[in-house]
Image (cartoon, rainbow, N blue to C red):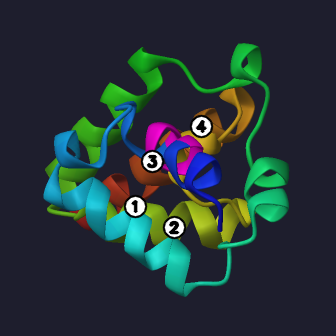
Amino acid sequence: MTEAALREWVEAVSGQAALRRMTSGQASELIEGLQGGLSDAGAFRASLVDHADRMTGAQQRLIDRLAGGLGWSVRQVTGLARHMYGRWPSESLTRLQASGLIEALKAIARRRAA
């Protein structure tokens, strides 16, 4: 992987332009992705959606809140997103896919409450 591709990946995962600004959770997601075979820059670019169609910040916050209510880690949410949509990182979901993930998390919470 070229340095430019790594920087692009880091920014997609963390929203940060530098590795040192990443949180430990973001670094873990980056490492998982590298180990999972997305190290090819072309495959990584193909896995991202157009910026205009990416999930909104409000959707991400709702996903985080719902996952927190379930006691889920970032890894578990990412695993669910990967299972549902074959996407990594979860930030590369479209708005429609993020809505589906939100509904899935709500359904899981309802089942746990019953």
Q: Which one is earlier in the sequence, the residue at label 2 or at label 4?
A: 2
The quarter holding residue 71 reads bottom left
Residue 112 lies, with reference to residue 61, above or below; the image says below
Residue at the spot of label 4: 98
Amino acid carrying label 4: it is Ala
Q: Which one is earlier in the sequence, the residue at label 1 or at label 3?
A: 3
x and y percent of residue 38 in the render?
Answer: 68, 73
- Count of numbered labels shown in the rendering: 4
| Distance from Cα at disc 3 to Cα at disc 2 | 21 Å
Secondary structure of residue under mark 2: helix
The dominant secondary structure in magenta is helix
Q: Determine the residue positioned at 61% across, 46% down.
A: 4
x and y percent of residue 5 in the render?
Answer: 64, 51
| Distance from Cα at disc 1 to Cα at disc 3 | 19 Å
Residue at the spot of label 2: 80
Residue 89 shown left or right of residue 24 in the figure: right
Q: Which one is earlier in the sequence, the residue at label 1 or at label 4?
A: 1
What numbered label is drawn on residue 77?
A: 1
Q: Determine the residue positioned at 64% across, 73% down.
A: 83
Amino acid carrying label 3: it is Val
Nearer to us: label 4 or label 3: 3
